[in-house]
């Protein structure tokens, strides 16, 4: 009996870490730059977008979101700012939350990073997440449960954005997301020092092996990953992407 119990305990010890590792974060140094890389198993985790609280006011930060979820018996496992927004924190581009479109797709070139086409959309469905460039999104019209548009694309079909220059001197803290071809792996990255677009895109393509990746933002880049020691604060933000679990 004792041996049977020990064997059962050992088996559970093997299973439990695997079940709790569907979101993992690690710090890595690549080509002299420092990054925090968080990988989400989109086939298993409750990955979704958040913008407003129940009163219709913009959440604005991770703490407000975490408190609101806790009141409903849920826990915010991971979160990151998820796209550009206006002064009132409404999304600049396409935004869907819980199947309801709150902002239409913005197509075509424009000023700033958002308008540096091709830009793209993070589309989250029940068991997958995909970064899709905006032109293809408009053609395919996937049925996203959650979606957020940002730009520019970092990697499109395995190629870096054509406007990225290896010798660029424009360096900023940046965050973005890339997805695997089967949609089961979503990789969220925030740089821990200022990087160029070329360096950032190259990380997704060459180090992480992702053929589709999207820039989310720069100056407001923030990360919530309590188990990794990150509960970033700072400027109030608009859309938030996060993983939720029962508390």
Image (cartoon, rainbow, N blue to C red):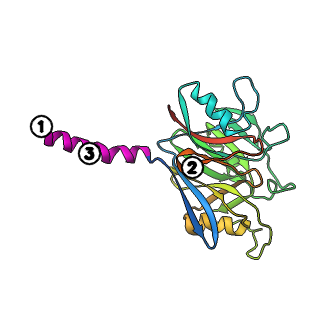
Q: Which residue sits at x=29%, y=42%?
A: 12
Please tell me whether the stretch drawn in magenta is mainly helix, strand or loop.
Answer: helix
Which disc number belongs to residue 134?
Answer: none
Disc 3/disc 1 C-alpha distance (Å): 15 Å
Which disc number belongs to residue 11?
Answer: 3
Q: Which residue sits at x=58%, y=68%?
A: 29
For label 1, the SS is loop
Q: Residue farthest to the front?
A: 229
Percent from the top left, x then y, of residue 176?
66, 55
Percent from the top left, x then y, of residue 125?
57, 40
Disc 2/disc 3 C-alpha distance (Å): 29 Å
Frontmost residue, 134 versus 9: 9
Within 10 angstroms of label 1, few (less than 14), some, or many (20 or more) residues? few
Q: Which residue range is magenta in the image?
A: 1-20
Q: Which residue sits at x=78%, y=45%?
A: 235
Q: Which residue is mark 1?
A: 1
Q: Is residue 198 visible?
A: yes
Q: Earlier in the sequence, mark 1 or mark 2?
A: 1
Q: Quadrant of the N terminus?
A: top left
Q: Is residue 7 above or below residue 157?
A: above
For label 2, the SS is loop
Q: Residue farthest to the left?
A: 1
Percent from the top left, x then y, of residue 231?
63, 45
Q: Which residue is mark 2?
A: 229
- In which quarter of the view is residue 35 placed? bottom right
Q: Residue farthest to the bottom?
A: 167
Number of numbered markers: 3
Q: Earlier in the sequence, mark 2 or mark 3?
A: 3
Say which of marks 3 and 1 sits in front. Answer: 1
């Amino acid at each position: 009996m004792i041996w049977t119990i020990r064997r059962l305990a050992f088996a559970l010890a093997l299973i439990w870490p695997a079940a709790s590792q569907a979101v993992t974060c690690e710090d890595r140094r690549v080509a002299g730059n420092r990054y925090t890389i968080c990988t989400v198993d989109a086939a298993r985790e409750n990955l979704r977008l958040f913008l407003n609280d129940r009163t219709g006011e913009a959440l604005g930060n991770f703490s407000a979101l975490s408190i609101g979820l806790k009141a409903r018996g849920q826990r915010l496992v991971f979160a990151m700012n998820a796209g550009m927004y206006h002064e009132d924190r409404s999304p600049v581009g396409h935004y869907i939350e819980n199947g309801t479109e709150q902002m239409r797709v913005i197509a075509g070139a424009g000023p700033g990073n958002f308008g540096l086409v091709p830009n793209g959309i993070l589309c989250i469905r029940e068991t997958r997440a995909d970064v899709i460039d905006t032109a293809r999104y408009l053609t395919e019209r996937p049925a996203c449960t959650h979606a957020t548009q940002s730009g520019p694309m970092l990697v499109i079909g395995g190629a870096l954005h054509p406007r990225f220059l290896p010798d660029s001197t424009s360096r900023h803290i940046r965050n973005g997301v890339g997805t695997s071809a089967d949609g089961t792996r979503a990789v969220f990255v925030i740089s821990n020092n200022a990087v160029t677009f070329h360096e950032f895109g190259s990380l997704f393509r060459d180090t992480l092996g992702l053929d589709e990746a999207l820039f989310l933002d720069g100056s407001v880049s923030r990360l919530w990953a309590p188990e990794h020691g990150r509960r970033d604060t700072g400027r109030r933000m608009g859309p938030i992407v996060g993983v939720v679990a029962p508390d």
